[in-house]
Image (spheres, coloured by chain):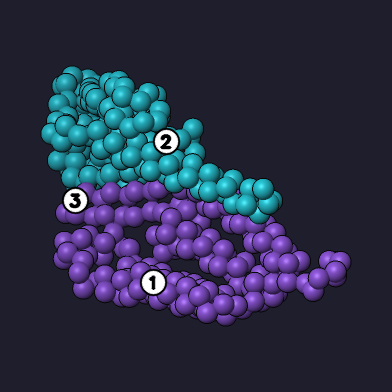
Chain colours: A cyan, B purple
Amino acid sequence: MKASKFLGLVIAAVQLVGAAALALGVHTMIGVSGSAFSQGGQEIQPQMGDPVVIPLTLHPRNDGFLEARLTVSLSLVVDGDNVLATDSATVTLPSGGSEPVELELSVPAIQFQQYLGSSDASWVAAVQVTTLFDLISFSNTMTVTGGA
Amino acid sequence: MSGNERMRAIIGAAVTLIFFVGAPYMLPKYLPPNIAQLLAESGFDLQGFINEVMILGAVTAALTLAKGFAGKASPVSLLINVAQNVATLVFMVVLLGAGDVSSLGVTSFTFSSENTTNYMVMDFRVFIYFTVLTVALRVVEVYLDWDEARVEAMPPGRIPP
């Protein structure tokens, strides 16, 4: 076999692997990131007290074909960049797997009352999914203004 | 260069023009309004992206056509083949960077609605490296092809340099 023909076959194989990796990786990332907040009505119910505890439980699933690592963080931010409370968690989801992610924010009661419904306060939820042996990633940082 | 190969080059160039110049040119007219609005709100420069794809399509079509008229063993043929592979690399960078060549595979979008802002980042740099690898291998392949064609085109009895 001529060297150029052999090289052509190698290139075709490499391109096939690349295309498959792209398709599988994107499929996994979209599935996992979509499932992280898929319940939609993820109502945040603060447990009143001092401090006020704000729990959040997510149930991400990995319906893709590759293992994925999911990092979720939730923060309560006031005045643009002053973080009142933050929590984050990272889980590794095997293909077809699911694992609950629990986050909990603790805010001093006085500050919670101060910023309750204030337009100066905002929730920042960040989701990052990495897959294909941590080679590709997708992140979505959602900022909702309008208070605790 | 046979007439058959020239005809193939003309058809190849025409198909490239249809898919990478004609289709992108028509795309905005057939894009659903809600998708167009979503893209506009995200700050995505659709027209700029389309223009880049059309330019690359026109360049690739021209190269395909020129290749059909250049002798396989000529240095011009080698240059055209290398240029086609470089165009493929640029196309991938444009595609994975959503039109932003300088982003080199890291694309970001911002969507805003009422009191919510979404900032999305996609990191596909590995596929840029992957494309660089395959394009490099393709360049070696076209060189080997060209070298074989050059040897075959030599008069009988001539020892290739």
Dot placed on the residue nearer the N-terminal end, 1 or 3: 1
Q: Position of residue A21 (x, y in %)?
A: 44, 40
**A76 above or below B85?**
above
Mark 3 vs mark 2, foreground winner is 2
Horizontal side, residue B8 vs residue A73: left or right: right
Q: Nearer the viewer, residue B58 or A45?
A: B58
Is there a contact, CB below 8 Å, between mark 1 and mark 2?
no
Q: In the rendering, at what x and y percent does residue B98 appear?
A: 39, 60
Q: Position of residue A110 (x, y in %)?
A: 22, 29
Q: Residue at x 44, y 46 (%)?
A: A19
Work out whether residue A43 can be spotted. Answer: yes
Q: Which mark, residue B115?
A: 3
Give the Cα distance between marks 1 and 2: 37 Å
Q: Nearer the viewer, residue A12 or B68?
A: B68
Q: Amino acid at mark 1?
A: Val
Q: Chain of mark 2?
A: A
Vertical arrangement, residue B78 with respect to residue A17, above or below: below
Closest to the camera, between mark 1 and mark 2, is: 1
Residue in view at x 73 percent, y 71 percent = B153
Question: In which quadrant is the C terminus of chain A drawn?
Answer: top left
Secondary structure, mark 2, is strand
Instruction: Tell me whether marks 1 and 3 sit on the same chain.
Output: yes
Q: Secondary structure at mark 1?
A: helix
Q: Position of residue B85 (x, y in %)?
A: 57, 63
Q: Secondary structure at mark 3?
A: loop
Chain label for disc 3: B
Q: Which residue is mark 1?
A: B15
State the image quarter where residue A62 is shown: top left
